[in-house]
């Protein structure tokens, strides 16, 4: 389930650093990347974003009118973690971000069956390129979905610019939501039915998540809502209770479905059962690494691996880092 970040986004991130006077060669060296950068795998892109962020002391990567100093995102994560529901968390996020008074105004409102999270450019304020919008919407939607157990979904996403050349990547970035371009603002439509989901993460967990941003935000998510979510919950229950990953036949029985019906319906949603199992396993491993002091060997066993070495190899393939490096990673 490798994620590739298009070359355009990579170039846009580097443009922010150059615009602020940073040496791109030094940035690439700090990120352990070659001198000529094209499309990047997600872990490589994360290293690039972190190199830019640390060099500029700007969590917005030089893309907006003023820098957002390192640590601001963690403060926001702690703030939204005290909300009781997903809807309240979006309200806290919009209020916090608007308080920054940088390049955008942020607002929240209900419209029909959706909660609308909207960002509008402030006249006269600098917005360097489209990555300024992409990064905000991806990071906010992923973080808030994570707060409620990776159970977010989007009914729509829209953007105040024409469709970019890498628009095909938006399908994964915005959870396969319907999209519109050339609008007066940018934003997300969150199903009202999901806004009542309870926030599950503590302040300490949320702060740890923010310190790993943007790594978690660019890992793939398939089981977000509907039947894929039901399957993910069943897989997670078996893994948590029995320390093993169930096959499709067992999950089908748990959901009172025939295996061929489950396979057909998942295919109709564009989701593969094996990918859901991988995602559940990966998310549990990430959660245990971030929120417990359990050893790598113990976490390997809890996530259904017979040997720690197999777990380490799998984790590196998911994130580009070893479990110990991931646990230590922070800005």
Image (spheres, grey):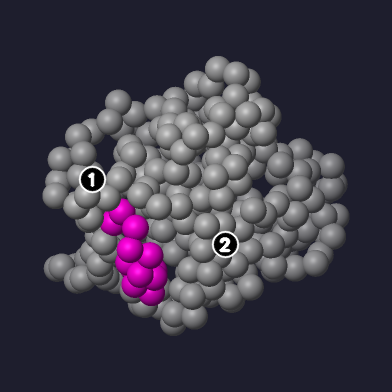
Q: Earlier in the sequence, mark 2 or mark 1?
A: 2
| Vertical arrangement, residue 59 with respect to residue 239, above or below | above
Image x and y of residue 49, in percent: 54, 41
- Circle 2 SS class: loop
Q: Which residue is mark 1?
A: 159
The percent position of residue 184, horizontal first and vertical second, equals 14, 49
Mark 1: which secondary structure?
Answer: loop
Query: Is residue 227 shown to the viewer in this render?
Result: no
Q: Residue at x 84, y 42 (%)?
A: 309
User: Camera-side residue: 301 or 259?
Assistant: 301
> Is residue 293 left or right of 185 when viewed as pictured?
right
Q: Nearer the viewer, residue 128 or 190?
A: 128
For this view, does 12 lie left or right of residue 204? left
Q: Tell me where the magenta segment starts and ends, as one range.
A: 92-104
Quarter of the figure that contains the N terminus: top right
In the picture provided, is 190 more to the left or to the right than 86? left
Q: Is residue 96 magenta?
A: yes
Q: Residue at x 85, y 55 (%)?
A: 297
Residue 67 shows up from this direction: yes
The residue carrying pointer 1 sits among few (fewer than 14), some (14 to 19) or many (20 or more) residues within 10 Å by Cα, namely many
Residue 71 is marked as: 2
Image location (x, y in percent) of residue 117: 27, 62
Residue occupying the far front of the picture: 21
Q: 301 or 21, which lies in front?
A: 21
Q: Main secondary structure of the magenta part?
A: helix
* Residue beneath the point at 51% across and 63% down: 72
**How far apart in space, not on screen, are marks 2 and 1 (Cα)?**
27 Å
User: x and y percent of residue 318 in the render?
Assistant: 63, 41
In this rendering, the answer to whether 164 lies above or below 86 is: above
Q: Give the mark toward the camera: 2 or 1.
A: 2
The answer to whether mark 2 and mark 1 are in CB contact below 8 A is: no
């Amino acid at each position: 389930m490798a994620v590739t970040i298009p070359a355009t986004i990579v170039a846009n991130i580097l443009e922010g650093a150059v615009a602020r006077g940073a040496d791109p060669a030094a940035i690439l060296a700090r990120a352990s990347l070659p001198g000529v950068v094209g499309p990047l795998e997600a872990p490589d892109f994360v290293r690039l974003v972190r190199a830019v962020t640390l060099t500029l002391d700007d969590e917005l990567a030089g893309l907006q009118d003023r820098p957002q100093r390192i640590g601001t995102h963690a403060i926001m994560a702690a703030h939204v973690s005290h909300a009781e529901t997903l809807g309240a968390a979006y309200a806290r996020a919009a209020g916090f971000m608007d308080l920054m008074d940088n390049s955008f105004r942020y607002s929240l409102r209900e419209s029909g069956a959706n909660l609308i999270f909207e960002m509008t450019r402030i006249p006269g304020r600098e917005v360097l390129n489209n990555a300024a919008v992409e990064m905000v919407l991806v990071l906010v939607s992923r973080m808030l979905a994570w707060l409620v157990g990776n159970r977010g979904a989007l009914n729509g996403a829209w953007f105040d610019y024409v469709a970019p050349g890498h628009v095909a990547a938006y399908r994964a970035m915005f959870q396969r939501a319907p999209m519109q371009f050339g609008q007066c603002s940018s934003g997300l439509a969150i199903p009202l039915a999901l806004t009542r989901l309870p926030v599950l993460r503590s302040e300490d967990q949320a702060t740890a998540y923010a310190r790993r941003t943007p790594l978690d935000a660019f890992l793939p998510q398939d089981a977000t809502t509907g039947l894929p979510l039901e399957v993910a919950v069943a897989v997670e229950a078996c893994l948590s209770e029995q320390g093993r990953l169930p096959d499709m036949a067992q999950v089908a029985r748990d959901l009172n479905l025939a295996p061929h019906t489950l396979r057909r319906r998942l295919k109709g949603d564009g989701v593969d059962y094996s990918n859901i199992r991988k995602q559940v396993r990966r998310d549990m491993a990430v959660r245990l690494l971030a929120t417990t002091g359990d050893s790598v060997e113990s976490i390997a066993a809890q996530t259904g691996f017979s040997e720690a070495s197999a777990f380490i190899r799998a984790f590196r393939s998911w994130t580009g880092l070893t479990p110990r490096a991931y646990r230590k990673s922070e800005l």
